[in-house]
Structures are given as C-alpha cells and as structure tokens.
Amino acid sequence: MPEAGRLGDVAPAHRFDVGRLEAYLRRAIDDFGQHLEVRQFQGGASNPTFLLTSETRAGPRRYVLRKKPPGQLLASAHQVEREFRVMSALAQTEVPVPRMRVLCEDPEVIGTPFYVMDFLEGRIFRDAALPGLPPAERAEIYDQLNATLAKLHQVDYAAVGLSDYGRPGGYFQRQIARWTKQYRDAETEAIPAMERLIAELPGRMPDDDAVTIAHGDYRLENVMFRPTEPRLIAVLDWELSTLGHPLADLAYNCFLWRSDSPAWGSLQGVDFATSGIPIEEAYIAAYCRRTGRQGVHDWPFYLAFSVFRLASISQGVYRRVLAGIAASQREAVNGAPHLADVAIDILSEGS
C-alpha cells in the first residue's frame, strides 16, 4: 500500500458510485462497517488504487481497492483478476502479501472489475538510494529485497494452485511477441531503436528455459517494509505476474543500477563503497547463491529484454495520458525512445 502522504481526492476519470460500492462490500466482507470514505493513491500509471475507510463498532477499518482503469484497454493489460489470484495463492507461502478480501468481476458495481485487500501500515521507498537511512539499514533493505525474490522463485507453483497461471517454457519468445504487439497497439511515432530491438532480441534468446512464478514488476518501489525496521512485509503490484523466467525478474530488478530515471528508480550517484547498497554484481551473486544458480550467461540479454518491456509499457502509458485515462495525472512525455536507446546500448555489451 502506498504511503498515506500520497493520498488525494479521487480523479474525475476514476470516480464511481461510493454508495453502491459500500452496499456491495457490506454483503461481501464480514463487519465491513458503514459511512465509507474513498481516497485515491497518487502515483503509478496502471491500475487505479484507492484507500477505503469504514466505521465499525471497533473503530475505523481500512482496506485497499484496486480496479481497472476506464476506457478501451490494451489486450491482456490491467488484469486485476490475476493480481487477486496470485496473492491469494501466495498467502500459504513465505512470500509476504496482503490479505485478499474479495474479487468483484461485475462491472455494474463501480464500472470495472476490482478487488479489495487489507491495508498494511508500512514504508514504501520511492528513492532507491534510501537517503537518510544508515548504511546498515540500507544493506538490510536490499538484502531483504533480494531474499524475497529468491523465495518467490522457489515456490512450487503447481502446489499452490498456479499450474495454469501461464504457459511453462518459451517465456521469452512469447514475451517479445506480446510486448511487440502492445507497442504496436499503442504506437504514436516511429522509434528506430524499438524496431532494432524487435528485430534483434529474438536471436539472443537463451537456451535456459527455467520456469517459476514471475512477478513482472519487481523493484524496491513495489514492496513494503515495516514502519520502524528493515523487514519486508508485502510484495505489491502483481498485475504483470505469470509463469515465466526467473532471470527476467532479476534483470528487471537490477535495472536500478543502470536506470537514469529517479521517477522509476535509479542508483546514479550512489557511493557503493560507503552507502551500504550493494553493487550490481554482488546483488546478482547473492541471488544466485540463494537459488543455487551457477552464474548467468549473457546477462545483457536479460537486461535489454527488461528495458524493452519498460519501453513498451511506457508507450502504453503515454497513449493513455494522451487519451486522458491514465491512473494519475502526469505530463504527456513519451519515455519509450530513451528506454529503447538504453536497451540497445546494454544489448551491445554482450555482442
């Protein structure tokens, strides 16, 4: 759950009938309460997220609602149903997730499908450099981030009921095709670097065809820590999760060390010798130790693929901003061209 300080009024494009929602949730959740108040978390560009506060005899009770955005959506995007399913399944594992309460697939209630989960009190770090924290706490936060990803990739997905959550094997072939299609569906201008990635990435796909639950958007901003200690208590934002390749998750996470975007997350300017934050190579080595992997062949492919995904996602965000249906108000700037250039530079490291 994002911090309370990033709450605001519900954006006009995302407003819905609060009375109808309250009536539905009073039937669906035991002791839900009444006098429902709804506020919207600011930031993010995907599924609109809201804080729900209701009054009960025991005092105020808080929940979080995630819904699909309004309007015409890209194919296979904004799948709140999948978020609900994977977090419900992971509740029985060592991967920390919020408690799921209800999934509503009836668009008649608030206009789109949505789910409700418990609100958690904690910290989400928007600045990957973790300013103001002592080096030991920074080191523990990054170690927890690493360890939790390793735990996720060691979950027996069939044992928790997710054997049909995606197609095992062939992940990169399908993903390159998917994000190429998503890019084409949202295309607004010619981007030569994207065309080059679409042409070159298929020829660099690895022989390694490992399959795990893949989060798809695993980074520091999408996990929550306890309010007063560096203990990771929830992994959030599972919209892009599937059965996939674990190194795609790791590479996406490690783009922090290459990113120059503070808005997405960046470690530019960090003194790794004194900050407590590990260098990229040490972070990768720690993950490999935890998962029993003997290093990574052609690391630049995994990184470049992850940045290609980001570029395609950015193109979709830009298209939604132009259409006025983005999850938060933001300037209409297309991040795809720069990200595609970065991906090309990374891909060339391994050629």
Image (spheres, rainbow, N blue to C red):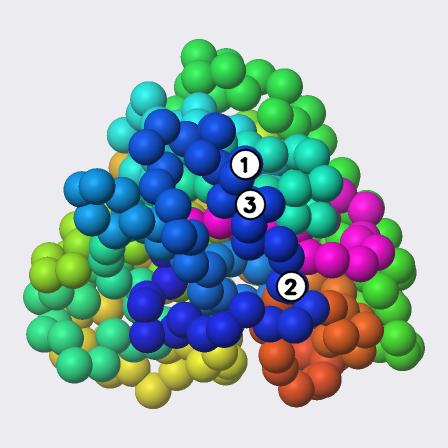
Residue shown at the point (16%, 81%) measured from the top left: 132
Q: Position of residue 202 (x, y in %)?
A: 78, 48
How many angstroms separate mark 1 from mark 3 (CA)? Answer: 5 Å
Disc on res. 21: 3
Residue 197 sits above or below residue 155 on the image: below
Residue 289 sits above or below residue 14 on the image: above
Residue shown at the point (61%, 25%) measured from the top left: 165
Is residue 67 a member of the stretch shown in magenta?
yes
Question: For the magenta stretch, what is the residue range?
Answer: 64-77
Instruction: Provide the residue designation for mark 2.
Output: 14
Three-letter amino acid code of the residue under disc 3: Leu
Residue shown at the point (45%, 74%) measured from the top left: 8
Three-letter amino acid code of the residue under disc 1: Tyr
Q: Quadrant of residue 17?
A: bottom right
Camera sees residue 239: no
Residue shown at the point (22%, 81%) measured from the top left: 131
